[in-house]
Image (spheres, rainbow, N blue to C red):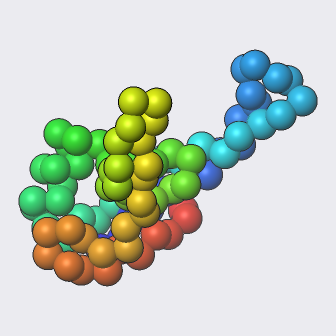
């Protein structure tokens, strides 16, 4: 599976002296299986700050912990992250 993304540096709206990176998944991404594509439509798992697909590891009252994945959770194919 090839996950194509672009990285854009944007100014922080709260502090003009800071910025943050925004990784946007492109529509040219080639999914390995229909199950993962449908899952990602219903439950977006792309993380814009890290530029990888993620799953939720744990949930607390204050926040949640995300874990980056390098393999499809449905068919097991390796995910190759490629900056366009």
Residue ID at (37%, 67%)? 69
Q: Nearer the viewer, residue 61 or 3?
A: 61
Q: Position of residue 79 (x, y in %)?
A: 35, 74
In the picture as drawn, the residue positioned furthest to the right comes out as 17
Quadrant showing the C terminus: bottom right
Residue 42: name its quadrant: top left
Q: Residue furthest top?
A: 14
Q: Residue at x 42, y 52 (%)?
A: 66
Q: Residue at x 17, y 59 (%)?
A: 36
Quadrant of res 35: bottom left
Can you see residue 68? yes
Is 81 on the left-hand or right-hand side of 10? left
**Residue 30 in the figure: left or right of residue 3:** left
In the figure, 27 relative to 31: above or below?
above
Q: Position of residue 47 (x, y in %)?
A: 45, 48
Q: Position of residue 54 (x, y in %)?
A: 37, 56
How many numbered discs, if any?
A: 0
Outermost residue on the left side: it is 35
Q: Position of residue 32 (x, y in %)?
A: 20, 71
31 to the left or right of 18: left
Residue 31 sits above or below residue 1 on the image:
above
Work out whether 77 lies above or below 72: below
Q: Is residue 6 visible?
A: no
| Figure quadrant of the N terminus | bottom left
Viewer-proximal residue among 12 and 34: 12
- What is the quadrant of residue 70 in the picture? bottom left
Q: Specify the farthest residue to the front.
A: 61
Instruction: Name the residue rendered at 75%, 19% in the picture.
Output: 14
């Amino acid at each position: 599976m090839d996950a194509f993304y672009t990285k854009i540096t944007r100014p922080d709206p709260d502090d003009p002296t800071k910025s943050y990176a925004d990784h946007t998944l492109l529509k040219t991404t080639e999914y390995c299986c229909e199950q993962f594509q449908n899952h990602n439509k219903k439950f977006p798992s792309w993380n814009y700050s890290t530029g990888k697909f993620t799953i939720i590891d744990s949930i607390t009252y204050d926040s949640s912990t995300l874990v980056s994945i390098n393999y499809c959770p449905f068919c097991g194919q390796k995910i190759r992250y490629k900056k366009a």
